Amino acid sequence: MNYLAHSYLSYQKPDLIIGNFIADSIQGNRFDGLTNGIIEGIRLHRKIDTFTDTHPVYLTSKHRFSKDFDKYSGVLMDIIYDHYLAKNFEQYSPLSLQQHADGIYEILKNNHAILPEHAKRFYSYMTERNVLYHYSTIEGIKTVLTHLSGRIRNRFELQLAIPILEKNYEDIEEEFSVFFSDLQVFCKEQPELSI
């Protein structure tokens, strides 16, 4: 799952939101200077990633992109699944997508000093372009994929996955719905959400 899902699955707990956001910038157990709550957020992020990467429904969705996008098919699926969450956000949350995004941006802004450098750079990109909100449209994820392609060595054109997405749109949306229900149950069973 990508940034929107990780923020949503932190269930409005600021430390978990921060930990989930910075997890990919933290190597191993280098937790110096982080609160226990933020460390729990990092651990939750890693559990979500492991659950996702081994879930059979997620793997079914991902398989559609494997032939053309090989090792990047997982990156594509994380962003595409975030698209379905964004598009249907009010089915999952009492907040609108923009209210949720604004709340996440505010928490990260208020804790900007403790974010690792990579996370600070992405925070700037994310807030300037309101990425969490724009995941809700095909055009929005195409923009994200184009930007991401520019950061990949040898410029792998991830945005070329959009026609595959459009061709399989309803099937992948159904798969997302099944998968995300399972993921929510999994997350609510984790001790991190009791802090």
Image: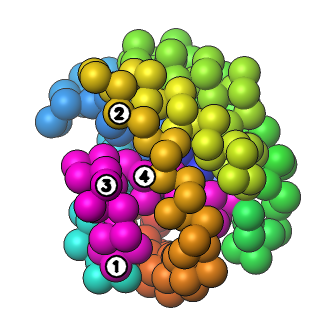
Q: Is residue 83 above or below residue 140?
A: below
Q: As shown in the figure, which amino acid type bears the numbered disc 4? A: Leu
Residue at point 43%, 30% (across, down): 149
For the stretch drawn in magenta, the main secondary structure is helix
First in sequence: mark 3 vs mark 1: 1
User: What residue is shown with label 3?
Assistant: 68
Mark 2: which amino acid?
Phe
The secondary element bearing badge 1 is classed as helix
| Mark earlier in primary sequence (2, 1) | 1
The residue identified by callout 2 is: 156
Earlier-in-chain disc, 2 versus 4: 4
Q: CA distance from mark 2 to mark 3?
A: 11 Å
95 with respect to 63 (left or right) = right
Q: Nearer the viewer, mark 3 or mark 1?
A: 3
Whole-number angstrom distance, CA of label 2 to CA of label 4:
12 Å
Give the residue drawn at x 22%, y 49%.
Answer: 71
Pair 2/4: label in front: 2
